Amino acid sequence: MTGSHPQSALAIGDVSEQTGLAEATLRMWESRHGFPRPERLASGHRRYSERDVELLRQVLEERARGLSLKAAIDRVVRAGDATERSLYAGLRRRRPELSAHLLPKRSVVALSHAMEDELAARAERAILFGGFQRERWYRRSEQRWRELARTADYAVVLADFPRARRPRDAPVELPLDRTDPLRREWVLVCSAPRFTACLAGIERPGQGNRPDPERGFETLWSVEPEIVHEAAHICCELVAEPAPGLSREIERHLDRVPARGDDRYDVAAAVTSRMVAYLGAAERGGSGTPARSDA
């Protein structure tokens, strides 16, 4: 270490020496990616911490595994943040531009199935996450999710399962603790190169006496690739405790196979059209809305 400053205030030359990164590279990363984030002295000189050095080394490790620079930085920065325990809360916190809408359960069911049907119709190899709260509610939709899982790269469902399971040709089943915030949430995330959609809903408390189809959920949904990508990464955080290896594997896949944004308007129109059709069939008393009882 050069100079007489403490280890908590490293100069750029010290960081360059410890990481092998040129000083010009450190400045370029900071300018283009906002990483690392050194403190500035009154003189304008940068001062880094030992934590900055550690994070830079982690980025270099991720780059050595094949990630792009942006993907490597994003992963390391996310890992340093507090782990999310709720998809709905995580999206609200990270994407404040999203508007929440209060929807009755029948509308949330219709929207979920519209997303799933459009994914199946496009034959996309997706990453899928589903939150069902209770095992018995997942079992009612299990055949549907088994069909979706056959063509998915990864499919994971969360509910109050007694243990983690990896059934053949079916989604990975991961258990939720009784105190887990996801026990109140409705989760659906579909991330594929040309199809992205996510839905996060949280049930309002105190609805025990309301008819089941009218129970309300504060709901966020989007087909924007960047938002769905964020939702998928939050889901990776949610499964990190029960399945850390799977979480890392899916994260690497997400960063290697990013979604494109040029299909989002087509996806939005298709999903909306299917949702309207489901709701219309339900109003006519038909069977247009398959049974899914996630809450």
Image: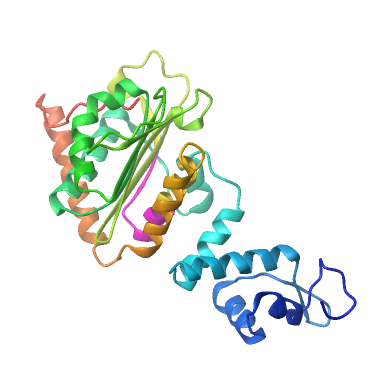
The quadrant of the image that shows the N terminus is bottom right
**Picture quadrant where residue 268 is located:** bottom left
Q: In the figure, 266 relative to 209: above or below?
A: below
Q: How many marks?
A: 0
The scheme the figure's colours follow is rainbow
Judge left or right: residue 87 versus residue 54. left
**Picture quadrant where residue 34 is located:** bottom right
Judge left or right: residue 285 versus residue 173. left
Residue 184 percent location from the top left of the image: 44, 28
Q: Nearer the viewer, residue 239 or 213?
A: 239
Residue at 13% of width from left, 49% of height from top?
A: 121
The quadrant of the image that shows the C terminus is top left
Specify start and end residues of the magenta stretch as a single range. 219-230
Residue 228 belongs to the span the image colors magenta: yes
Q: In the figure, 271 relative to 202: above or below?
A: below
Judge left or right: residue 93 versus residue 68. right
Q: In the figure, 265 relative to 108: above or below?
A: below
Residue at 64% of width from left, 70% of height from top?
A: 36
Residue 194 percent location from the top left of the image: 24, 61
Q: In the figure, 99 relative to 29: above or below?
A: above
Residue at 34% of width from left, 58% of height from top?
A: 224
Residue at 87% of width from left, 69% of height from top?
A: 6
Residue 74 belongs to the span the image colors magenta: no
Judge left or right: residue 116 versus residue 68. left
Residue 206 percent location from the top left of the image: 47, 19
Q: Nearer the viewer, residue 89 or 32?
A: 32
**Picture quadrant where residue 53 is located:** bottom right
Q: Residue furthest right?
A: 4
Q: Is residue 282 visible?
A: yes
Residue 100 percent location from the top left of the image: 42, 43
Q: Is residue 293 visible?
A: no
Q: Residue furthest top?
A: 209
